[in-house]
Image (cartoon, coloured by chain):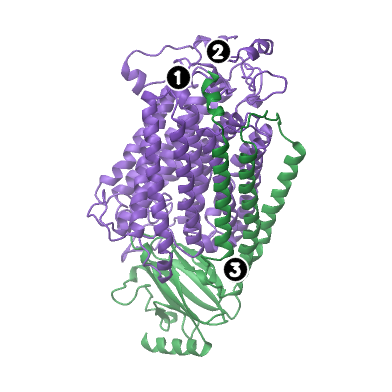
């Protein structure tokens, strides 16, 4: 194995102090794990909030834990809506797939010793952590958490507590948290881009990068462009709230009988800025999952990814088109109807690279030798969700149909399946797949499978009926079903979904048990337990602090050389020189 | 090292493959059943535009439904057929002809749907209101709809935000000095004659609200600072619910109103009666 002199110089040794090693660490692997555990805490809170909401929707008079006063008020319900959405989108779906797994595995997969800017990396994490603390603190201030949803449309979010409880300090903390998060994400994306561009091992050409790396790379571009716009929008919202500006606030507002002193602003401006971020954000959440799923499908199919170049190209196409479709969130907002038509055609076009991905995943499975380990099951579940959620999106992409389904539970079902649960399945797949590498131990397979079956079935039981509720006119963000007479007929479906939600949430305890037990007692893992080809598997599990023990790899082939005809083993690792292959075939373990 | 992987393999992969396939088949069957049996239908449409929306919806349902069934069953077939039975996986890197064909098929299907969907959207949004359309102003505030008819003069009176006062009976802030406002009719429920074009002018006093009547398949935000026109012609007599779908504050869930579609004669009587009350 030849080493790369450039990176060999920068080999670092693990710091000795506990604080520098595990808390203020600059090691991308530790930072990746910090992001992972932050996301784990966030998803736990997010799920509890959703269970409280689901319970309240079905049994509105019941006494609930964590709820001041015991019985949930409409403003408490909306605070849960807001915080559930915000925590899940920012601190789970943005944090886990990109910041956690990207941080840990991007340098390993391209053969680098660390990220390009390790201190910046540490700073990004601690900013994200601060943002999380600020966000949670909104629960504990007078008035409580904001009630304007994760989209925070002004004037509701721009005028202070006159528009409702939680719109005072709570909403201010919300904006502050989002601004901090934006800075962290911008710094993180710069780090990802520099690392991918500059620090690839010799021989790691763009078309030899694993699709995971492609996905993290495209996602970093999206983060850079999207979070900067959200940051700008957030600053304007803060100014409207505290400095009496009127970016989003028009003249003549009368709230609760009081005339407001703003004038000249446009509420639609915020919607444009927000969704210019908000739609790419969907892809920030899902693209890394697509990368992980392609990677895992190939590994456990023992086949190359079907149409590797098309897959990389589709990632780029989805990322690019993702910036041109934000208006489909605004068909009924009062935007020019001709713009609506344009956004509609661009939105249905994004179905093309999405369908390409699905086709290629099926193509990867075709003629395969499928090994059903837990990560593979979650990857297959991802494909099923992506198909379902993608196709339900074709309805919402058409403004005429959106006028019927907009703001109904149909939308909630759609985006939970396609960007929520699909992304979560990507995270689960990644966790089961890379756990042996990260912790040097293996998770229990039977528990993993059990977790998969309950979650896969449970998720469909929660979110498929949600589409039906929406088609029948069930409106989202309603604190109870008394607002319109026809809503009562939908309550049995809501009951079914609530029960499914509790069962599915309970099934996650299996995951937690398996995860934490395996940390201590799992079977010891070898360097390459899945017989995989990419560079993270050639180093020890867990990897040393400089990743490759001072011997940096040179790359000789593409990332998915499985079942190559004529080879004596069914995988050819990227780093093995062609001349070494003869002996490698006889002795697969020398990958270690 | 290969121990774990090979040990798991020897246990056989038939059961997860079979379970997955069965699960996906059940998913497809249940979903198809719900749609074919129309278990959770939208209410019948009451306007021509709403019928167009339903037609486009049905067309999309056929296309997306077929894709859903084929993709999920294809997945079920692949995981079952290609489970590890000790065979050699085929080393296929792709199939350019098939990939290009697939790209064009989806492009045609999805963009085609989008283009066909234009008609239903254009009918409701691009067509200017008919010359004989009845203009009615809809004002939203937390958490109430207020409707204003221009009265016999056909003109709405001037509004002044500083005059808004719901307790004294002037929720819209109509300026008493403007003669055009003297005959304005302000009511809390929307009444329109059947088969007559109506132009609603949506405005909001405080935050963003929404006006949604399911039977009209019509949903439109009311945005402060904007006056947004929407057109419809209701063709079926009856009373329909108006709901707010845009998160507008703690009373969002109970912000609603009623749309009465009445015979022409009843509409005339309604205007006469309200003119006397105002």
Q: Nearer the viewer, mark 2 or mark 3?
A: 2
Q: Which residue lies furthest to the front in this view?
A: B11
Residue at label 1?
Answer: A542
Residue at label 3?
Answer: B124
Residue at label 2?
Answer: A552
In the rendered image, residue B173, in percent from the top left (x then y), is placed at 36, 72
Local secondary structure at mark 3: helix
Local secondary structure at mark 2: loop
Local secondary structure at mark 1: loop
The residue closer to the viewer here, B78 or A539, is B78
The residue closer to the viewer here, A157 or B191, is B191
State which chain disc 2 sits on: A
Q: Nearer the viewer, mark 3 or mark 1?
A: 1
Do the residues at pointers 3 and 1 share their chain? no
State which chain disc 3 sits on: B
Q: How much space separates mark 3 and mark 1, taking CA atoms? A: 61 Å
In the rendered image, residue A393, in percent from the top left (x then y), is placed at 57, 52
Residue drawn 55% across the image and 11% down it: A6
State which chain disc 1 sits on: A
In the rendered image, residue B51, in percent from the top left (x then y), is placed at 61, 71
The residue closer to the viewer here, A89 or B67, is B67
Mark 1 and mark 2 in contact? Answer it, CB < 8 Å.
Answer: no
Do the residues at pointers 2 and 3 share their chain? no
**Chain letter for the purple colouring in the rendering:** A
Q: Residue furthest left?
A: A69
Q: How much space separates mark 2 and mark 3, taking CA atoms? A: 63 Å
């Amino acid at each position: 194995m030849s080493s790369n002199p450039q990176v060999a110089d920068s080999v670092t040794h693990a710091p000795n102090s506990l604080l520098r090693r595990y808390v203020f660490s600059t090691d991308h692997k530790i930072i990746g794990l910090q992001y992972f555990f932050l996301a784990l805490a966030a998803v736990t809170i997010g799920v509890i909030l959703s269970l409280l909401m689901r319970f309240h929707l079905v049994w509105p008079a019941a006494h609930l834990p964590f709820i001041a006063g015991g019985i949930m008020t409409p403003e408490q319900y909306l605070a849960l809506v807001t915080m559930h959405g915000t925590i899940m989108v920012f601190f789970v779906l943005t944090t886990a797939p990109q910041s956690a797994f990207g941080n840990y595995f991007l340098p390993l997969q391209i053969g680098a010793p660390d990220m390009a800017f390790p201190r910046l990396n540490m700073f990004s994490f601690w900013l994200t952590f601060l943002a999380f603390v600020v966000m949670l603190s909104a629960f504990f201030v007078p008035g409580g958490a904001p009630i304007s949803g994760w989209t925070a449309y002004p004037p509701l979010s721009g005028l202070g507590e006159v528009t409702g409880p939680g719109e005072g300090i709570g909403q201010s903390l919300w904006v502050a948290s989002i601004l901090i998060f934006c800075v962290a994400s911008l710094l993180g994306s710069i780090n990802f881009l520099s690392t991918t561009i500059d620090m690839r091992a010799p021989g790691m050409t763009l078309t030899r990068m694993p699709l995971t790396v492609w996905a993290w790379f495209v996602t970093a571009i999206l983060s850079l462009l999207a979070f900067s716009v959200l940051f700008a929008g957030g600053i304007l919202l803060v100014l409207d709230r505290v400095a009496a500006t009127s970016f989003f606030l028009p003249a003549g507002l009368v709230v609760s009988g009081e005339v407001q002193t703003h004038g000249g602003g446009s509420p639609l401006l915020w919607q444009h800025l927000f969704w210019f971020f908000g739609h790419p954000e969907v892809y920030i959440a899902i693209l890394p999952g697509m990368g992980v799923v392609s990677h895992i499908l190939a590994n456990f199919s023992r086949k190359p990814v079907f149409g590797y170049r098309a897959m990389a190209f589709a990632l780029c196409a989805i990322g690019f088109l993702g910036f041109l479709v934000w208006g489909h969130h605004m068909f009924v907002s009062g935007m020019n109807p001709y713009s609506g038509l344009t956004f509609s055609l661009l939105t249905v076009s994004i179905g093309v690279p999405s369908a390409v991905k699905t086709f290629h995943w099926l193509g990867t499975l075709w003629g395969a030798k499928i090994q059903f380990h837990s990560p593979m099951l979650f990857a297959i579940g991802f494909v099923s969700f992506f198909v379902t959620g993608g196709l339900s999106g074709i309805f919402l992409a058409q403004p005429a149909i959106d006028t019927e389904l907009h703001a109904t539970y149909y939308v909630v079902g759609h985006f939970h399946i396609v960007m929520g649960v699909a992304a979560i399945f990507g995270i689960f797949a990644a966790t089961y797949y890379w756990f042996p590498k990260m912790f040097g131990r293996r998770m229990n397979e039977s528990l993993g499978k059990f977790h998969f079956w309950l979650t896969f079935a449970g998720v469909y039981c929660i979110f498929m009926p949600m589409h039906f509720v929406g088609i029948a006119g069930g409106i989202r963000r309603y604190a109870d079903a008394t607002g319109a007479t026809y809503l009562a007929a939908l309550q049995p479906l809501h009951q079914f979904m609530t029960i499914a939600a509790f069962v599915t949430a309970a099934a996650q305890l299996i995951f937690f048990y398996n995860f934490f037990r395996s940390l201590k007692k799992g079977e010891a893992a070898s360097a390459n337990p899945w017989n995989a080809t990419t560079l993270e598997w050639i180093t020890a599990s867990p990897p040393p602090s400089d990743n490759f023990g001072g011997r940096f790899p040179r790359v000789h082939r593409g990332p998915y050389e499985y079942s190559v005809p004529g080879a004596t083993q069914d995988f050819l690792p990227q780093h093995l020189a062609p001349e070494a292959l003869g002996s490698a075939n006889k002795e697969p373990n020398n990958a270690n | 090292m290969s121990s774990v992987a090979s040990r798991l393999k020897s246990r056989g992969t038939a059961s997860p493959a079979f379970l997955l396939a069965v699960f996906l088949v059940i998913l497809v069957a249940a979903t198809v059943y719900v749609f074919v049996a129309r278990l959770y239908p939208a209410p019948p449409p009451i306007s021509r535009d709403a019928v167009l929306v339903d037609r486009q919806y049905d067309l999309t349902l056929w296309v997306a439904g077929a894709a859903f069934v084929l993709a999920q069953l294809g997945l079920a077939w692949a995981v079952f057929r290609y489970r590890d039975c000790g065979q050699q996986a085929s080393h296929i890197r792709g199939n350019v002809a098939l990939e290009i064909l697939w790209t064009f098929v989806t492009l045609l299907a999805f963009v085609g749907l989008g283009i066909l969907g234009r008609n239903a959207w254009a009918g409701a949004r691009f067509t200017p209101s008919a010359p004989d359309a009845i203009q009615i102003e809809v004002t939203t505030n937390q958490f109430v709809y207020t409707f204003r008819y221009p009265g016999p003069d056909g003109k709405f009176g001037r509004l002044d935000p500083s005059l808004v006062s719901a307790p004294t009976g002037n929720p819209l802030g109509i300026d008493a000095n403007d003669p055009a406002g003297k005959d304005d009719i302000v009511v809390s429920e929307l009444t329109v004659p059947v088969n007559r074009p109506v132009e609603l002018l949506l405005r909001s006093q405080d935050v963003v609200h929404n006006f949604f009547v399911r039977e009209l398949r019509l949903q439109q935000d009311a945005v402060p600072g904007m006056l947004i026109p929407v057109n419809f012609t209701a063709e079926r007599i009856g009373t329909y619910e108006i709901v707010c779908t845009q998160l507008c504050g703690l009373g969002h869930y109970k912000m609603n109103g009623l749309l009465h579609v009445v015979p022409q004669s009843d509409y005339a009587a309604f205007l006469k009666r309200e003119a006397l009350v105002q």
